[in-house]
């Protein structure tokens, strides 16, 4: 679908888009204390959750409409624009009624096309910018689908928020970033601004800066961080929230990277290095071709002897050796494993095709 997506704040910004505010609006005092703590820090959008979609019942589900009048006060008292999450028609109407400047779709909404469509329908004919969080699970198409549904409703000012993906297993993140997914999105939609929600990626305070800096290094367009006057007392996401002053410090320490440069010397040197990379890539491809030819011969040999394609012992041996070799040469085990798995899978596919007579014999 051809889309002409426009910047979320109306105009593209040279410096990162900064969004900060509490996970949830809890009381009028808490919302205003956060807002006053942030008002001189160059915040583009003040965030606060009014309706909180919780994974399990029993936790704080948001103060509801009452909180919107506190956001209105934030605008009046500080001049900051405000944003909140909407998940259904009623949320959209209420948010619009109270003058919310930008709305966002949460991860638990993006995951459900019915809900996304409901919000899109409620937004028809309204010119309000919309931010779309990635779906909880690493499903690229669901994220794209949500962008398309909102765009089709007539909204052009769209940005996405990368908040990481749930992961079943041990990890230092609350939601693993899987940076390749937002990077792929940027490749498909070059105009689309990407904001990094470091709070929901980290789930803790001590790694917030590093994740935000990584987003800057990857040329993301902004950050969204949860800020609370007394984080330990927060009614939701207490562990990941920081005080306004801690946020200002984080923001001031962030190093912004340039998307590009006109420096001729820089590009000459880059050309040289890239040329070398291209040559290495070509070599890798040629080696892959050779490896697959060998693997085909093995497939034919297995077929003649009626031997199964998958030989688990052999595969374990290959993998362990490669991971150990990689470690000694400063390649991460994750990388070596992912690379070898892809190669091994391709070998298996080809050998299965040979055993089943679906591949012409070379
Ligand atoms: C939030 O922003 O507080 C929130 C609920 O986030 P997510 O939808 O990313 O879980
Ligand atoms: Mn939160």
Image: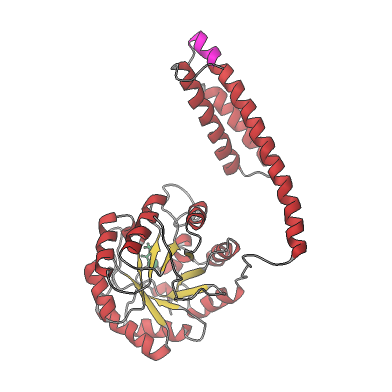
Residue 283 vertical placement versus 137 (above, below): above
Q: Is residue 138 at all visible to an observer of this figure? A: no
Decide which of 260, 299 is in the foreground and name it.
260
Q: Number of numbered discs present?
A: 0
Q: Specify the quadrant that holds the C terminus.
A: top right
* Identity of the residue furthest to the bottom in this view: 77
Q: Position of residue 80 (x, y in %)?
A: 42, 84
144 falls in the magenta region: no
Q: Position of residue 89 (x, y in %)?
A: 23, 68
Residue 122 vertical placement versus 45 (above, below): above
Q: Is residue 197 left or right of residue 135?
A: right
Q: Position of residue 327 (x, y in %)?
A: 66, 41
Q: Position of residue 57 (x, y in %)?
A: 25, 60
Residue 339 vertical placement versus 179 (above, below): above
Residue at (51%, 69%) from the top-left corner?
222
Residue 229 vertical placement versus 204 (above, below): below
- Asked which quadrant contains residue 53, the reply is bottom left
Residue at (51%, 82%) from the top-left corner?
42
Residue at (48%, 52%) from the top-left corner?
181
Please name the predominant secondary structure of the magenta segment in the image: helix
Q: Quadrant of ligand 1?
A: bottom left
In magenta, the rendered stretch is: 300-306
């Amino acid at each position: 679908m051809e889309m002409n997506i426009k910047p979320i704040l109306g105009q593209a910004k040279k410096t990162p888009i900064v969004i900060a505010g509490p996970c949830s609006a809890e009381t009028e005092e808490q919302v205003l204390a956060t807002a006053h703590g942030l008002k001189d820090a160059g915040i583009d959008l003040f965030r606060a959750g009014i309706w909180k979609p919780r994974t399990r019942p029993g936790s704080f589900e948001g103060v509801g409409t009452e909180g919107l009048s506190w956001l209105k006060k934030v605008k009046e008292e500080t001049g900051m624009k405000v944003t909140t999450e909407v998940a259904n028609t009623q949320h959209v109407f209420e948010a619009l009624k109270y003058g919310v400047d930008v709305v966002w779709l949460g991860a638990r909404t993006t995951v459900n096309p019915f809900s996304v469509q409901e919000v899109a329908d409620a937004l028809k004919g309204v010119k309000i910018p919309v931010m779309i969080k990635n779906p909880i699970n690493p499903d690229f198409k669901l994220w794209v689908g949500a962008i398309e549904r909102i765009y089709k409703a007539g909204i052009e000012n769209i940005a996405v928020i990368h908040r990481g993906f749930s992961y079943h297993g041990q990890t230092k993140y609350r939601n693993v970033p899987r940076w390749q997914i937002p990077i792929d999105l940027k490749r498909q939609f070059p105009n689309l601004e990407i904001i990094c929600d470091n709070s929901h990626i980290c789930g803790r305070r001590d790694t917030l800066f590093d994740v935000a800096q990584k987003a800057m290094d990857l040329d993301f367009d902004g950050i969204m961080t949860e800020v609370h006057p007394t984080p330990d007392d927060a009614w939701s996401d207490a562990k990941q929230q920081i005080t306004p002053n801690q946020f200002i410090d984080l923001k001031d320490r962030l190093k912004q990277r340039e998307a590009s440069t006109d420096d001729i010397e820089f590009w000459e040197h880059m050309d040289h290095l890239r040329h070398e990379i291209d040559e290495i890539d070509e070599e890798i491809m040629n080696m892959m071709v050779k490896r697959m030819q060998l693997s085909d011969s093995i497939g034919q040999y297995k077929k003649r002897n009626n031997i199964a394609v998958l030989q688990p012992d052999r595969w374990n041996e290959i993998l362990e050796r490669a991971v150990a070799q990689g470690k000694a040469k400063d390649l991460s085990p994750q990388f070596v494993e992912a690379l070898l798995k892809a190669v091994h899978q391709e070998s298996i596919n080809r050998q299965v095709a040979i055993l089943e007579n679906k591949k012409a014999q070379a």
